[in-house]
Image: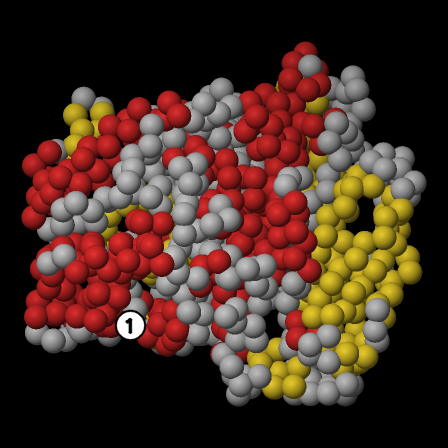
Amino acid sequence: MNLRKVLFVSSIIGNAACFVQAATPVSLTKDTEIEKKVEATLAGMTLEEKVGQMTELSIDVLGNVVGGEFKLDKEKVKNAIGKYKVGSVLNAPGPVAQSREKWKEIIGYIQEVSMKEIGIPCIYGLDQTHGTTYTLGGTLFPQNINLGASFNPELTYESAVITAYETRASNCPWTYSPTVDMARDPRWSRVWENYGEDCLVNAIMGSEAVRGFQGDDPNHVSEDRVAASVKHYLGYSMSRTGKDRTPAYISESDLREKCFAPFKACVETGALTIMVNSASINGVPVHANRQLLTEWLKENLEWDGMLITDWADINNLYTRERIAANKKEAIEIAINAGIDMAMEPYDLDFCTLLKELVEEGRVPMSRVDDAVRRILRLKYRLGLFEKPNTDYRDYPKFGSKEHALIALKAAEESEVLLKNRNNILPLSKGKKILVTGPNANSMRCLNGGWSYTWQGHLADRFAGEYNTIYEAVSNKFGADLVTLEQGVTYVAEGAYYEESTPEIEKAVAAAKNVDVIIACIGENSYCETPGNLADLAISENQRNLVKALATTGKPIVLVINGGRPRIISDIEPLADGVINILLPGNYGGDALANILAGDANPSAKMPYTYPRNQAELTTYDYRVSEEMDKMEGAYDYDAVISVQWPFGYGLSYTTFDYRNLRVNKDTFTENEKLEFTIDVTNTGKIAGKEVVMLFSSDLVASLTPENRRLRAFKKVELQPGETKTVTLTIKGSDLAFVGADGKWILEKGDFRMQVGNQVLNIKCSDTHKWETANICVNK
């Protein structure tokens, strides 16, 4: 890691409030030469060319599948680009992953036509969300939820750097990633696309992903980096029903203080594009919300990047949200609210209707020019005018062993050890092992959605060279000692919840001949709305499997493998060990085998709160009044919430001792720096990594305070017996909150600060209220 990167990571981690800012306001400084080119290009464009640049089509409408292979239809390409002047294309054909050679052919031809017909390059976008997910042979990393569990920003950065490199090897300059919505509701089908439930973790990890994708100079993105699209702005994860793309009702304080925070951090780290939330907040569809799109994002942050819709979401303003009578009115509302590019996957009438709206004076030409400036600026920053294409032959590290080792390390650091009764783990050599359960022998389960296909359902076709859990355990412990009898299986390439007729008795019979059972349970892959659920409990077949296996008396290690927490409170007591591997990617099976054997020491922590019961869903930063003691007398108001595992929980094969928490000043104001130091000792017999977390609790506030908030974290490695003094730095203003009036305020009074089991109190000496929308806006 170079010095600049070390300094950046240190500054990000030290900036502990959720309104984390980058070390330098890179995205807020325009490049004079680029701006001249943008204005010169814009001045020569017709209205048709401008509205075309604001349009993005799906690749599927530009070709056909012939003999099992996608072929571009040259007439369709010429019509879209030559006639309608379309400026962007997205998605994989099918959508199914393509080879690098195929991407060179597809995108190369589109660029050839675009430069010939309008003199402006196309910008192609792919959902390369956890590695090179839509390019065959590329490196697939753990999903974002795993990177959140690692609490290691460097791994997030490295995985983004490699993803960018391999995406440019695919001739694609733009990825729709990272996702920083926050996984606040375990029912939601997109929990795994985020870095967990906490806004600080999402802000730090999202910022590192943006830097990894784009590099340190977003005005001049190099040929081995790509533009990021941070999504889904904002509040997308907090729907009332827990279903995808459904309405959210969010207080202004939570909206500004938590939902907005990761996006603000990513903007201040240089994010070039942002994708908008498909649903509504407090009754207003976000695609129609000028306050959120234009005022909060573009004006208050002085952001000069580009806003893109999600899939056909302008249509939803009249078909689903019903705030517009027809498509034309929907376009008028969305563009005037601040949308710059419309993801219109199948329909070119957006171009015709927007042109009419401008000619009728319903959409000002100034708004169209602003949008097109942002699009052109993006293309100039990516160097697409000078070099529209990149050649896979210039990227020799594509799919390399070097990249694979980083993916394996990321998987090892992101699988969470949750239970280890009687030190059943690591497993001793020579034991006979039964590997069972529906997730035992599937690459699809390890990868989740956005893996070779949208739903990830074809992963086993494309990932055969990698190891399932069973294969990895066999390789590690010896094939002669490992038996596979799943008992419950998923329907091949079916919906995520479809299971075949169980054969539990076969697994029970096999268990009688082994020393230990590894029961691999969880979910099959899914993405977005098809991943909605009605029951948060794990399937009845899987619960029955574990209960039947427990009757054998053999020790059970539960391996939980899925995109969100599924309730297992009735079977967890039957297990001696529990490891939540989440969605660890193509090397997740190998990482698990290394942990089971003790070749890797687990260091991950829970990135979300794992619920114990269906009706007790919460987050770690709940308001203190949500958990209270029973009242005396006839009225028993019992609001105590029980969880299976809390946010930040995770075990190791070694132990750590925290001592001597201190702070440089116990009284502070908003501008003062607070340095907390703690001595952390590895008291075990093997080396290990520990995530040192600083939490704050506001003891009395004008709004009911939260139970606690994560303010800073740092991951450190310690040898046996070694002690390190860890310093966690925040500002006084980091302890401010958004009050009932929508203003940031730091109130006079006491705060309890906690690191590990160590606690101390500090006092704010004066109340300070900010009149600006954000506490820190870089100028």
Residue under label 1: 337
Disc 1, SS: helix
Q: Is residue 759 left or right of residue 86?
A: right
Q: Would you place residue 484 above or below residue 75 in this image? A: above
Q: Quadrant of the N terminus?
A: top right
Q: Would you place residue 507 above or below residue 262 in this image? A: above
Q: Is residue 200 visible?
A: yes
> In the orientation shown, which residue stands out farthest toward the top?
480
Q: Is residue 503 left or right of residue 570?
A: left
- Residue at the spot x=12%, y=33% of the render? 73
- Residue at the spot x=51%, y=42% of the render? 160
Q: Is residue 616 visible?
A: no
Q: Is residue 567 left or right of residue 245?
A: right
- x, y percent for residue 680: 86, 51
Q: Quadrant of residue 631?
A: bottom right
- x, y percent for residue 684: 89, 39
Badge 1, how many Cα within 10 Å: few under 14, some, many 20+?
many
Nearest the viewer among 318 and 163 is 163
Indicate how the structure is coloured in the image. Answer: secondary structure
